[in-house]
Image (cartoon, helix red, strand yellow):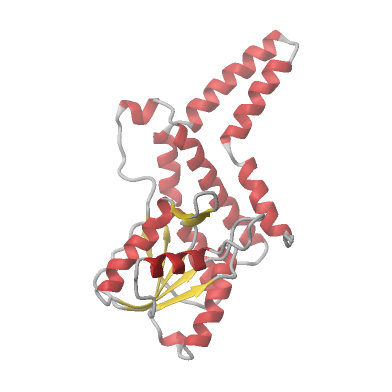
Amino acid sequence: MVKFNMFFTLSKILTFLLSPFTYIFLFILWAYFTKKSNRRRKLLLFTVIFIFIFGNRFILDECVRLWEMPISDNTSKHYDVAIILSGMIEYDAKNDIKKFNSNADRLLQTLPKLCKNEIDYVLFSGGSGDIYHPENKESLLLKEYLESIQWNTSRWLFESKSRNTYENALYSAELLKSKFPDLSQKKILLITSSGHMRRSIACFKKQNIHVEYLSTNRFSGSRKFEFQHCFIPQTNVFNAWTHLGHEVIGYLSYKFTDKI
């Protein structure tokens, strides 16, 4: 049985409402059913302008650049624990395989540091973000994957109860405090996406966990003035607006509910 959680469920609904595709569909639907030809023309013109703005990679990059945390260089430092936040792996039941997405950069940036002994332990934090399949816990999926390729997990810790960023910090803090009684003396590196980092750091600070950070899979990249980049709408940009809106609204909602 699916356990209902209002905040968790509302966050999923909000993601739908933040999608530009939702409003493009509604504008076109409104234009189709309206009986006033003048209103129809205005709606269609507004839809074209809306698509240009929210499909424009240059405009998106400039907005994302204001939100993303900058790439930090921690290559010369040593850390007792690196915390990787979930959002990178899921289970494909039909084909019985585990699939990674672009957030796997969080893992890929961690492994070299672990191999070079720049990190003593890795804590992977993440349960299930799926309302209908709470049994598919990311940390357990990753653990199974690592073991399937014969990767030694003796220096890994897995937290599988969290469903969102706030719970990532909450349950990670509980696990670390039980593992390391002298946690305040430990150097901790937080690893997650650049766009997700601002909210993540605030959540860990709320749990009295001081972290340095390593931002991964930065979206904005270098500023470009190429024709296609500045003027041609791109479908992947619509999804990126959804992610940006989700992070900004998520940060504000956490602030309002005293989670950060």
Q: Nearer the viewer, residue 94 or 155?
A: 94
Q: Residue at x 50, y 40 (%)?
A: 239
| Residue 69 shows in this picture | no
Residue 200 picture location, percent across and down:
50, 64
Where on the picture, by quarter, is residue 236? top left
Quadrant in which the C terminus appears: bottom right
Q: Quadrant of residue 253?
A: bottom right
Name of the residue lying farthest toward the front = 95
Residues 121 and 251: in front is 121
Left or right: 250, with 117 as reference point:
right
Q: Nearer the viewer, residue 17 or 255?
A: 17
Check the picture and name the quadrant holding the N terminus.
bottom right
Residue 236 against residue 251 in the figure, above or below:
above
Q: Residue at x 68, y 22 (%)?
A: 29
Percent position of residue 89, x then y = 47, 57
Q: Is residue 219 visible?
A: yes
